[in-house]
Amino acid sequence: MIGSDEITSIRSPRVKAARQLARRSSRQRTRLFLAEGPQAVREALAWSVVTELFVTSESWSRRGELVAQASAQGVPVLAVSGQVMAELAQTVTPQGLLAVCRFIDVPLQRLTEAAPRLVVLLANVRDPGNAGTVLRTADAAGAGGVVFSDSSVDPYNSKCVRASAGSLFHVPVVAGSPLRQATAALRGAGMQVLAADGGADRQLDGLEADGALGRPTAWLFGNEAWGLPADLLALADEAVAVPIYGRAESLNLAAAAAVCLYASARAHRTSPG
Amino acid sequence: MIGSDEITSIRSPRVKAARQLARRSSRQRTRLFLAEGPQAVREALAWSVVTELFVTSESWSRRGELVAQASAQGVPVLAVSGQVMAELAQTVTPQGLLAVCRFIDVPLQRLTEAAPRLVVLLANVRDPGNAGTVLRTADAAGAGGVVFSDSSVDPYNSKCVRASAGSLFHVPVVAGSPLRQATAALRGAGMQVLAADGGADRQLDGLEADGALGRPTAWLFGNEAWGLPADLLALADEAVAVPIYGRAESLNLAAAAAVCLYASARAHRTSPG
């Protein structure tokens, strides 16, 4: 089925073009990104945003249904050697399937129009793995959107896409939004903006007990290492700390986000709102 | 202060010996591990478990108090070049301070004697970053101990030590315990064993509402990718799922652990127990 058509050189123009999407500047220019593995490829095909599918011969037989689905959508399917796939996927254990996809982020207005009860704002989050994990957690907690500020990592970074485990395709994502504009728009849509800040006096449990988490809420999370500076904290209605009961100085971003987002999810499901 | 004594070769016997501690087998044989950065070194000095301290000239002046404290404890302090430190620390941005430390894990019995209300059991957790993050979260949630099963990553793995952000020194850690023995001992100490399992029928929120989280609890967490197999689930009193409100298939380990541990911490602080 593949035979002589298999691309074995990383110098092939199509491979080179796809490899360039590892760079943010190339993604921005082409508005294309890479999604790797059967789960992400399945999601991307469901969105009809795949422009090209690279497949190793092993995956061609194991994932025939995805290859057939791509072909049915008129997507060019390119057989590549394991070595070419390893170059494209840039992972230790490439999964044999990699799709070039069109951007799927939405304008901020689309997100606010849907009147979500729970939204995540990522400010200055620089580690793509962290950003992807928070996106996945936001999805699990039932969030109606995730906003990546203009000073945060790009949601289409391969590590972010991978860490999101498909959630990039589940939750409306706004990319590169100025934070001031995002908080204003979300507040305009009736949401309170809560900043997660380990140093805050107000504790999450107190807020939950007071019923203050029942309101539609946008959670603002800051940088992994240095949190939220004063000018960003000022954009929030309130700063809230996850309580530390032991001797840890702080929680890491993914853990703090999980605790905050699930507190909101619980409150939204028990409050009359 | 340093001058001609600075070690500039990675072939120096002391540097070579320390570098070997990157390997689990060397750590097991010598019962020594590496702790990097001012925070970890400060903790290790407080425990009096440092056997050797490597310092770059820059850190020697910036962290003089730690160097002085080490000297006062009779710990050999070795000046090394930036290149040697980079080799030792195996991080992209080495922090200029690295201590060789004696193991600090405790026997299982020491942990159960203290009658903790919250304990974490790591079964088959293979990623050291994940394990360290869960250790940090356990510390933050006020856990009285973390047990690394014999099939989990080693708590002294450098990435685990780093991800724990000092929590390895805050929480009693049991290393390499057979899981069957650990669950039996914890149950013998009056704890219920709850397995975090995305596929479980019983939901965390239901357990919390029923007051079942008020009891002393050991949380069992499985492998990042394949969770807990049936034979390990059988070691728990109950399997519990963190609810998924959106379209994510699951939470990642660190996020699931944060939600479970903080649910227990809340329950312990509001229940009469």
Image: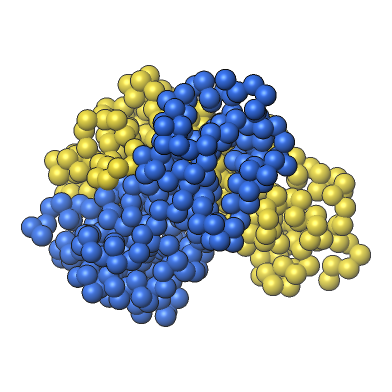
Chain colours: A blue, B yellow
The residue furthest front is: A74
Q: Which is nearer the eye, B100 or B159?
A: B159
Residue A48 occupies quadrant: top left
**In the image: residue B148, left or right of residue B57:** left
Total number of numbered discs in the rendering: 0
Residue at image point 69% right, 40% down: A12
The residue furthest left is: A272
Q: Which is nearer the eye, B70 or B135?
A: B135
* x, y percent for residue A37: 50, 35
Quadrant of image for the N terminus of chain B: bottom right
* x, y percent for residue A130: 47, 53
Q: Which is nearer the eye, B76 or B222?
A: B222
- Say if residue A228 shows up in the picture: yes
**In the image: residue A27, left or right of residue A120:** right
* x, y percent for residue B30: 70, 36
The residue furthest right is: B4
Q: Which is nearer the eye, A216 or B131?
A: A216
Q: Give the answer, above or below, for where B140 lies relative to A15.
A: below
Residue at image point 65% right, 55% down: B36
**In the image: residue A258, left or right of residue B88:** left
* x, y percent for residue B213: 22, 42
- Say if residue B27 shows up in the picture: no
Residue at image point 49% right, 44% down: A51
Residue at image point 43% right, 57% down: A253
